[in-house]
Amino acid sequence: MTYTQMKRTSRLTLIVILAASSFLTGFTYRDLGASEGIPGVLANVRLIPTRLAAAVTSAIEGEDSALPPVETYWSVFTYVNSNYYGKKPEPTQMTYAAVRGMLASLGDRYTRFLDPKEYGEMQRENRGDFEGIGAVLDVKDGHVFIKKPIKNSPAIRAGVKAGDVILKVDDKMVQGLDIIDVRDRIRGERGSKVKLMIKREGVPEPLEIEIVRDIIMSPIVEARMEDDAAKIGYLALGQFNEKSDEQFDEALTELDGQGIQALILDLRENPGGLLDVAVNIGSRFIESGDIVIIQTKGGRRNTIPVERSKHNHAMRPLAVLVDHGSASASEIVAGAIQDHKAGTLIGTDTFGKGLIQTIINVQQGAAVSITTAKYLTPSGRDVHAEKIRPDIVVEPSDEDLKNENDVQLKRAVQFLKERLADNQARPKKQEHEQS
């Protein structure tokens, strides 16, 4: 790369990123989630607006006097590139580092720069797959642990078990790290190896487990008849990605065919996903009204109503399971169901991620994810500040978790049986009163 090319590349990359924040209002919002139980980001990939392209063109032609941050960066970059004594990174990496530093100054964990590898991973997650070991992570008492290994995953094959506390990743301590940082250290390219040191209950010494990473297909939908006698169906949704709505519809149709009279919707450990998918799935349980409110920086509120075309299944008694890992799009659906009294929430408080990110492509396959708005429930509750609190609080004990005793699911079955019994008794009572 020639010096002139480096200058154009660095200036163009930074100008695109700096100018982008002025042209975000009015974009369509989508919620792009992560996996392994980690709350994701609300996102939307858009082409650079015409006004932004004009600003970039003017800057390249030397008419950028109104953009002193760019001139400051360029002055430092030029001096470092020409005079730094030690070994320098590639110009692209220097620009990436500068952008990361700028975004970090905002103090918003969801506003971040995505290099081509990170952006590619995000896109794969949106499609329903990622590269890693295949395990759902969670946090308790400041320790990241394996909540659940995914079926047929490298983690299962290597002997990882639910409850294993992660002490080290590739010989580096993870105590005190954010769960997202631990996740990122565990993930990696297919075929590469990662070494975990874990503490397992009942085993006196820590264990070291080497795992070969692979392509993990995120489990999206799990459906079954939970109680044959009462005809209570169970449908778990792992993520709101491009495949979710179609698979959800197919699973619910199959349960309809088995004659279910009530349904348990399990959103536990669901980190989020696409906003339009959340609207579609939420609409299956709500007859009319709004699913979510989007509030932009200036306080303007835009409502997203129920998608009536999704009313292709019978409305029936509904229990929704939520927990601390239910985030973002999961909270949109749970909050809407609760506000419209379309179902009863059972479990623990949700994660509390109510911020919306817009993703903007920059050159060479990189992108920036910038918080541009937040969402509220239909009644106006601020999810980011308040979380979603269930109607019936059920907190599993350590003993429950150890023995895989799903007390939340059992409470949901009990609740629906009581509801079905009440529904059966009500017509008889009304008939008696009329006679």
Image (spheres, rainbow, N blue to C red):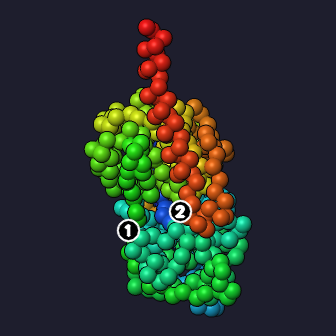
Q: Is residue 20 visible in this depiction of the protein?
A: no
Front residue of 97 and 193: 193
Q: Residue at x 67, y 59 (%)?
A: 397
Quadrant position of the C terminus in the picture: top left
Residue 269 position (above or below residue 202)? above
Quadrant position of the N terminus in the picture: bottom left
Position of residue 99 measured from the top left corner of the image (x, y, whole percent): 57, 67
Q: CA distance from mark 2 to mark 1?
A: 14 Å
Indicate the amino acid at tag 2.
Answer: Gly
| Residue identifier under label 2 | 37
Q: Is residue 377 visible in this depiction of the protein?
A: yes
Position of residue 238 measured from the top left corner of the image (x, y, whole percent): 44, 57
Residue 261 position (above or below residue 216)? above
For residue 135, side relative to residue 251 (left or right): right
Q: Residue at x 47, y 78 (%)?
A: 155
Residue neighbourhood size for the residue with mark 2, other residues' Cα within 10 Å, grouped as few (<14), some (14–19), many (≥20): many
Which mark sits nearer the N-terminus, 2 or 1?
A: 2
Position of residue 124 measured from the top left corner of the image (x, y, whole percent): 39, 66
Q: Residue at x 44, y 57 (%)?
A: 239
Q: Residue at x 65, y 53 (%)?
A: 395
**Callout 1: helix, strand or loop?**
strand
Residue 92 position (above or below residue 30)? below
| Residue identifier under label 1 | 217
